[in-house]
Image (tube, helix red, strand yellow):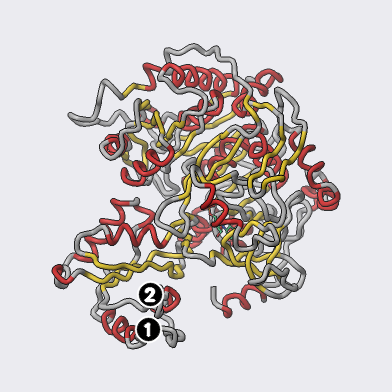
Amino acid sequence: MSEETLSNLLKEDRRFEPPAALAEHANVTAEAYDHAAKDREGFWAEQAQRLTWDTPFEQVLDWSNPPFAKWFVGGRINAAYNCVDRHVEEGRGDKVAIHFVGEPLEPETSGTRSITYAELKDLVSQAANALTDLGVGTGDRVAIYMPMIPEAVVAMLACARIGAPHTVVFGGFSSDALASRLEDCQAKVVVTADGGYRRGAPSALKPAVDEARTKTDVVEKVLVVRRTGQDLGADGWDDAVDVWWHDAVDAASTEHTPEAFDAEHPLYVMYTSGTTGKPKGILHTTGGYLTGAAYTHWAVFDLKADTDVYWCTADIGWVTGHSYIVYGPLANGVTQVLYEGTPDSPERGRWWKIIEEYGVTIFYTAPTAIRSFMKQGREIPDARDLSSLRVLGSVGEPINPEAYVWYREVIGGGNAPVVDTWWQTETGAIMISPLPGVTSGKPGSAMNPIPGVSADVVDENGQSVPDGSGGYLVVTDPWPSMLRTIWGDDERFKETYWSRFAKEGFYFAGDGAKKDEDGDLWVLGRVDDVMNVSGHRLSTTEIESALVSHPKVAEAAVVGAKDADTGQAVCAFVILRDDAGDGGDDIVAELRKHVRKEIGPIATPRQVMVVPELPKTRSGKIMRRLLRDVAENREVGDVTTLADSSVMDLISSGMSTGKDD
Ligand code: PRX
């Protein structure tokens, strides 16, 4: 982010006080910060009591071998029991856990229904029995590649119930991306569906699993939910491998005794982009993660589990769906909405219709969505009664002040505080956020670390920067929901997160941030080669490798350029192989399609520029900063460290040939 944007941001002086009525009954008051700071471990031990432990823990934190943490040592617990069974045992079996809203409006296809906690317990037990019958044992990995349907949640909880770590792969990822994740975590079983409804039509999933299976042979069984009933094709079913969910799960017993696992038993692996081409499998374990998810969901959203109706619009394929659809909300026993489709299907304003119909009180979404609604105009949400909303959340990327204020005024009617929550796949749970009953919000600022979390902004040398300055965002003490390692790669875990400020023992988040004059935090975005497109993390290197895997491409460089809708957009510069000539008329479309196929639609470049050269330092490192200048149409910056500074002229002249589609 440029200095100019920075100073504009910091000139933002609007303040929004917590509504008095909310503050009066808020779950968390200002004392919580001091209380937690005095005895951080004691504070987290208290929060762990939100859960039901089979065996109590003996030690809160074992940090004797950093950065490998153990939380709640000696404790034994079952995550699914905590998310489902205990609510039934405590007399809340008839309470709705999930109001599922299918995308189609037609009753024959929508599948819209409400599932109580008692029903959820039966479904999860049946799925747990079915997975066991398919040969899944404790510690085996199960991949989940599903649309946003209740069975996805059921599958995750069934895995947790039997101690089989799940890895949910976003349904928008390609078969290649799926295959590499299956291979990396050696998933024995895949749970999928024939397809899901998106933008008014069935969108197939099963064929991608079939294709992935041609690239890896780790998968033994595929459990398939029939959602759309679409034709699977002549070769679309393999009796030796494929099993229908309605055969295996519906027939299974609803009796299943959850086994308690060690607090550090792996709960799931979530792949996320890093600075290299290979996605990292972020490992989360059970007791600490669930404590973090449950506490933050209760504290940051001021959750009143008896009366609130909660809705998080994330996909379960991302960490937000894990922590704030499945584990946090269900551990807290809420009633929530789960919506299958897109916001504009069958017409714009579908989200607002859902909020009105279900009386949603807490709503959690992403800035990119808010910006797209702003563009459509306020008459669309204004046509609905959104007065039930009392807390609004934002996640995934910095929220620009205009979007924040629009969200607050138009969606929240000026009464609902906006909590801008900063966290990451790695942190497992919200780390920096206003508290709705305590903090006076500033549009664009994530404000302060929540009670129990300590974070800071430091300079190159790990020294805390003074108020009014910027630097690197670090977490200075371990926290319960922290990642435990990168699956199968302890070295990369140490190197990526803990080496930059090793002396200080800080976790380096990869983000830049600024402290304002009041010491409040403004997260500015990544300082590494990771892009954030519509709140989704993409690695420049991953897209570059996809591009060079195309036979016509010799070299590629990818940068994230500022984009009014998606925050950042993928811009690719490619050099073609000599024998490819000028690549042909469709080269740009061809390369965009190729990336889409290799990774998935979210990685599709906004622009592909065919260039004769790339700017490099003498040591051969591509100078992405200069490419970003070009992609953002800025005056090209300092080129003195370039091996050949005429390259930038070449690139600029190449661009004028209009290779961008
Ligand atoms: O750059 C930050 C940005 O998203 C990154 C984490 O991405 P991911 O692991 O995919 O998790 C997204 C959902 C938690 C961060 O390193 N980010 C996330 N939330 C915010 C944010 N940037 C600014 N403000 C936020 N509230």
Q: Nearer the viewer, residue 202 or 245?
A: 245
Quadrant where the image shows the N terminus: bottom right
Q: Is residue 114 visible?
A: no
Q: Is residue 637 visible?
A: yes
Residue 426 screen position, x and y as percent:
57, 49
**2 vs 455: above or below:** below
For residue 632, which quarter of the picture? bottom left
Q: Secondary structure at mark 1?
A: loop
Q: Nearer the viewer, residue 13 or 87?
A: 87
Residue 301 screen position, x and y as percent:
68, 46
Residue drawn at x 63%, y 51% is 392
Q: Is residue 559 left or right of residue 475?
A: left
Q: Quadrant of ligand 1?
A: bottom right
Q: Amino acid at mark 1?
A: Ala
Q: Which residue is identified by label 1?
A: 643
The disc, 1 or 2, on the residue closer to the chain's N-terminal end is 2
How many residues crowd mark 2 within 10 Å: few (<14), some (14–19), many (20+)? Answer: few
Residue 563 screen position, x and y as percent:
44, 68
Quadrant where the image shows the C terminus: bottom left
Q: Which residue is identified by label 2?
A: 620
Q: Is residue 154 left or right of residue 191?
A: right
Q: Amino acid at mark 2?
A: Gly
Q: Nearer the viewer, residue 16 or 590?
A: 590
Q: Is residue 212 left or right of residue 409?
A: left
For residue 335, which quarter of the picture? top right
Query: How much space separates mark 1 and mark 2, taking CA atoms?
Result: 8 Å
Residue drawn at x 41%, y 52% is 278
